[in-house]
Image (cartoon, rainbow, N blue to C red):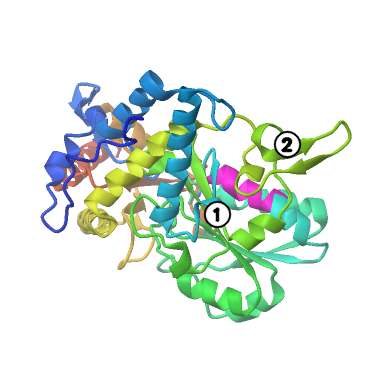
Amino acid sequence: MNPPAETANLAKRDESVDWTALRNEFPILRETVNGHPLVYLDNAASSQKPQQVIDTVRRYYEHDNANVHRGIHELSNRATEAYEGARQRVADYLNAGSPEEIIFTRGTTEGLNLVANTWALDNLRKGDTILLTEMEHHSNLVPWQILANRIGAKLDFIEVTDDDGQLDLQWLDEQLARARLLSLTHISNTMGTVNPVAEICTHARAAGVVTVVDAAQSAGHTTVDVQAIGCDFLAFSGHKTCGPTGIGVLYGRRELLEAMPPYQGGGEMISRVEYRDSTFNVVPHKFEAGTPNVAGAVGLHAALDYLDAIGREAIFEHDQRLAKRACERLAEIDGIRLFGPSEDRSGVVSFVLPDAHALDLATMADQKGVALRAGHHCNQPLLAKLGVAATARASFYFYNTEAEVDRFIEVLHDVRKLLV
Ligand code: PMP
């Protein structure tokens, strides 16, 4: 079997990380957009892919592709080995107790829906409370709304402080005392807030509340250790972590997974099937109905190798350095509103200008090759609370440079001159 990732040329990188060399490993960053060099600042929506990940997926299709767990033949064995090798790699990446605690999904959204439709549907009753926060992405809000409406459960929210976008945890223990499940994001995709998930999960555990962490914005950027966090479930997406689209991960504590009903029926999730009844496979296969995204898992394996070869601490520091520079330069603009904490934040920077609509700004920045995001960022209730309909958002990753931050600010000033 071919190695799942070409990591040999990636020496362990520490403070002396050669960020320019890394950047050169991303072919798409050499694109020009509207006649300008691409400045890709939409990493919170999706990350770009290094050559190593692209090559690994191509190599899988060229040499190893077949269906998994079914064949007696060589290619099926190779595909199965690659798929289960990816599961082991994810378990190591998250410091999970075993690969059986790793379920492959389509992404964070599917992972959260899986928990809502299995553990929660099976365990929550009319009148029970599901605790969320006011900063949740729609993917960690709507599944709980659907479930709550279906079973007559209630939703409660940990509030966000107006001034700096932090969770207001003064009522946490009271809120937990009324709740059965808590689902919250690790890092806010709009404000860049880094939530103290380990501390919150410690309180939740003491209160007997099951915890779900949305790690969509953190898994590719910083250390995510499910044992240190102490959560029961955690979900993330491959496409935001330098991996392919269409692959994601749900971590679940083994004893909970074993007691849960299946999510979807069919394919590998069965043990024995009769016309009127079936018995189900062991975890994690019980939750993976149908042919899985093997190439996606193999690509994700390569992506996680890639990120760990750089070092997640170094990546997060780089994100933070760029965000700090952007915030400082943005703060010089009269009347600008910057969202989120001023300290200890991630690489996500949202803002509203007094004189230019976010959508106009992003559209005109695109004319100059700068990819920003503008809108509600799937955070409509949060934006309503903050009193805005849309923000412009720049989100940084390790392949972005300080020169790109400066180019983004320069373009912003040019665009404002045209808009006001
Ligand atoms: N949660 C958060 C915090 C996110 O930022 C996103 C993606 N924007 C999601 C969930 C959903 O991720 P996906 O679309 O990959 O399922």
At 47% across and 59% down in the image, what residue appears? 96
Disc 2 marks which residue? 265
Q: From which residue to which does the magenta span run?
A: 108-117
Quarter of the rendering occupied by the C terminus:
top left
Task: Find residue 127 and report its horizontal and vertical position in percent.
Answer: 81, 66
Label 1 element class: helix
Amino acid carrying mark 1 in the image? Glu
Image height check: is 172 above or below 371?
A: below
Residue drawn at point x = 22 percent, y = 57 percent: 314
* Residue 274 picture location, percent across and down: 84, 33
Q: Is residue 110 magenta?
A: yes
Q: Disc 1 and disc 2: Cα gap in Å?
A: 19 Å
> Is disc 1's CB within 8 Å of ligand 1?
no
Q: Earlier in the sequence, mark 1 or mark 2?
A: 1
Residue 31 or residue 79, whichever sits in front? 79
Observer-nearest of 382 and 74: 74
- Residue 238 as seen in the image, left or right of residue 257: left
In the picture of the structure, the residue carrying the numbered disc 1 is: 101
Is any part of residue 277 visible from this angle? yes
Pinpoint residue 36: horizontal percent, then vertical percent.
Answer: 19, 26
Whether 112 is among the magenta residues is yes
- Vertical side of 319 occupied by 39: above or below: above
- Quick one: label 2, few (<14), some, or many (20+) residues within 10 Å? some
Q: Are marks 1 and 2 in contact (CB under 8 Å)?
A: no
Q: Is residue 15 above or below residue 62?
A: below
Badge 1 density bin: few <14, some 14–19, many ≥20, Cα 10 Å: many
- Residue beneath the point at 40% across and 48% down: 89
